[in-house]
Amino acid sequence: MTGFQRAFDRTEKLGWRCALGVVDRLSPRLATRLVHRREYGQRLELDDPRDFNDKLQWLKLYGDRRGLSRCADKYAVRQFAAERDCAVALSRLIGLYEGVDAIVWEELPARFALKCTHGCGYNVIIDDKRKADERAVKRRLQRWLKERYARRYLEYHYDAIPPRVLAEEYIETATGGVPVDYKVYCFHGRPCVVLVCTDRGGDMRFDFHDPAWQRLELNDRQHQSAAGVARPRALDEMLELAERLSRGFVFVRVDFYERQGRAVLGEMTFTPGANVSRRYNAYGQRYLGDLIDLTQVGRRCRHDREVTAGRSLSFNGTVQGADNGGHE
């Protein structure tokens, strides 16, 4: 890519985000439709949503968002997990920093992980501090701290999370490589699907399973592992922890790693793939969508002037975006 092309792309992206911000202030519903069309390539169905992405977008706009920011915050979720009797799954905290200047490189261990608290993908894994470029790492973190992650795809609950840097222990694996990622999809407080992400350092593979570890064909075969994935020793613990953490939420994905047969909590995500993920096939979209029962969710509007046109969903009248708002 030429310098001119890169400059053009940056200008186009900036223009898009500015325009999106204006539309979002006027109509979050319309802005979400625009993002969905641009990123997912399909029309967003909000009047009678059936697919997983569509229902997640509906929940983003009209569901109860109490507690979402706290659990999506990479630091605040630690206290939430402790309150749910899940502290055993927390990795060791090294430090919390308001800015990169507060990070004392010399005091960090030989291996560690740095994360920004206010978004997803803001991670730097240091497996050998002697070989790491401190300045480059801090420049990257500084750039991330300045970003309003929530504005990328209108994941509103990230807006309330203060941008900070978190340092945690390095998750060691038996092979010394990147740990396997186990993502537990929980619906109405019940773990129903486990997505396993392998080969994260290369050609990543995605394999879906039910809690009994039967494979689910929710994505295309070319993205799955050829030989399948072994059941983790910590699966039962992951499912139990996920059930505790997801209690009170319509949907949340709880991510884990496994270390020496024990579960390690990664993060909690309410808008996987920003609700525009292309990871699922058509069957997967409908399968996961069917696990969300919107008739149990009371509807609220971000703007009173925004109303749902066309067919309406049937609700029971109680605002219970998360089981009568019972979560923290």
Image (cartoon, rainbow, N blue to C red):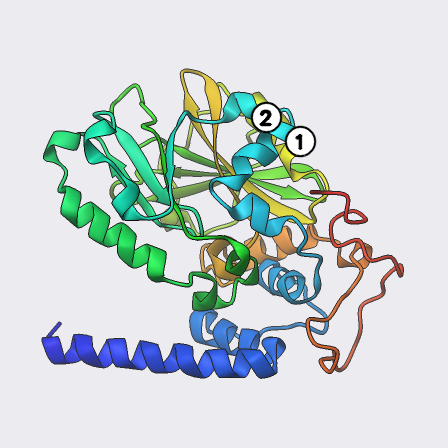
| Residue 202 visible in the displayed image | yes
Whether the residues at callouts 2 and 1 have beta carbons within 8 Å, the answer is yes
- Give how far apart the Cα atoms at labels 2 and 1 are: 8 Å
Q: What's the residue type where badge 2 is placed?
A: Cys
Task: Provide the secondary structure element on which disc 2 rests.
Answer: loop
Of the numbered discs in the image, which one, if any, rests on residue 244? 1
Q: What's the residue type where badge 1 is placed?
A: Arg
Residue 82: x and y in percent read 59, 28
What residue is rendered at 21% in x and 35% in y? 105
What residue is rendered at 51% in x and 21% in y? 234
| Residue 232 visible in the displayed image | no
| Picture quadrant where residue 167 is located | top left
Give the crowd class for mark 1: few <14, some 14-19, many >=20 residues within 10 Å.
some
Residue 171: x and y in percent read 34, 26
Task: Provide the secondary structure element on which disc 1 rests.
Answer: helix
Q: Is 249 in front, or is 293?
A: 249
Residue 106: x and y in percent read 19, 30
Q: Residue furthest top?
A: 260
Q: Which residue is mark 2?
A: 86
Q: Is 117 in front, or is 211?
A: 117
